[in-house]
Image (cartoon, helix red, strand yellow):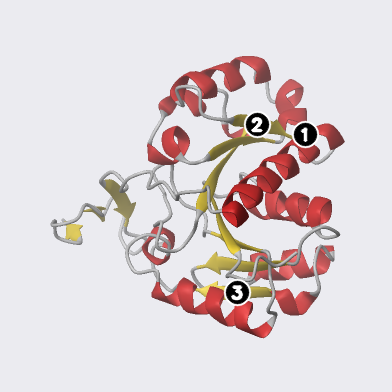
Amino acid sequence: MSNGKRALRLGIAGPVGTGKSSSIANICTALADEFRIGVITNDIYTDEDARFLKAAGVLPEERIRAVETGACPHTAIRDDVSMNLLAVEALEEDFDPLDIVLVESGGDNLTATFSPALVDAQLFVLDVAGGGDVARKGGPGIGRADLLVINKIDLGVHVDVDVEQMLADAKEARDGQPVLGVSRKIPETVEALAAWVREVHARFVKGDHTPVDPGPMAPHFHADETGEGGGYMHTHDEGEAAHSH
C-alpha cells in the first residue's frame, strides 16, 4: 500500500503510564494486515517500550526500534528531533516501502507536543486511572493534538471516574476536535482508533493532510533527583534560554 513516497509519521505522546505503548499495540494489531507499519519508541535510558511491543508480537521485531534520548523526553520530539528523524528515515530505508511509522514519546507531562518537522499528525493519550479531572486541565497536547485518546475506559468503575463526564470535558477542552474513549477490552473502541488512523493515512496519500503544530510546551518544573526540593524551570519557547533556574 505504499504511496511511492515516504510513510505517514504519527506521533504518540502522553504522561507516564497512560498507555502509549498499548495504544501502539492496538493500532498495529488492528492494521497490520492492511499497512506496513514501523515503530520508533523513545525512553531516556532504556528500550523497555520497544521490548514490550516486540514481546506482544504486534509486528515483526525488526520493524520496532528504540531511541534512548538521554535527556528530557520532549527534547527529542520537539527541540532537536534529529535523533528521532534519523531513526525514522533509517527504518523507512531498511523496510521500504512502509506505509506508517509510529513514533512514541517518552512519558512526559501534559504539555508535551511533537514538532511537525518530525511527525505529520499526533495523538495525545490520557487514561481514566489518572483522574477524571485531567482532561479539563488542558494544555497544548490535550487541546491541540490531532486526536485525544482517553484510554482504559473500562477502569472507570474501579477508580470512581465518570467516563462520560471525562469524555465531555475533553471535548469541551478541544473545541470540537476529535476525542476517543478506548479500551483494549472493548473491540469497537479499538476499531474506532484504527479508523481514525486509516482516515489520516488516506488524506496523507491524497496530499490533503497538512501537519498542524500544537504549539510549544509551556514552562514547566523539573525536580532535581539529587537534592530534596531542588530543581529548575524549563522552557521550550523560541528565543528564550533553554533553562531558567
Among the two numbered marks 3 and 1 on one chain, the one whose residue lies closer to the N terminus: 3
In terms of depth relative to the viewer, which is nearer, 220 or 113? 113
Among the two numbered marks 1 and 2 on one chain, the one whose residue lies closer to the N terminus: 2
- Amino acid type at circle 1 is Thr
Q: Specify the quadrant of the image occupied by residue 115.
A: bottom left
In terms of depth relative to the viewer, which is nearer, 17 or 181? 181
Q: Can you say which quadrant of the picture contains the N terminus? A: bottom right
Q: Secondary structure at mark 3?
A: strand
Label at residue 189: 1
Determine whether label 1 and label 2 are within 8 Å by CB: yes
Q: Secondary structure at mark 2?
A: strand
Please give the name of the residue rendered at 55% of the width and 50% of the height, measured from the top-left corner.
16
How many angstroms separate mark 3 from mark 1 (CA)? 27 Å
Residue that mark 3 sits on: 66
Among the two numbered marks 3 and 2 on one chain, the one whose residue lies closer to the N terminus: 3
Q: Can you say which quadrant of the picture contains the C terminus? A: bottom left
- Amino acid type at circle 3 is Ala
Position of 240 with respect to 234 (left or right) is left
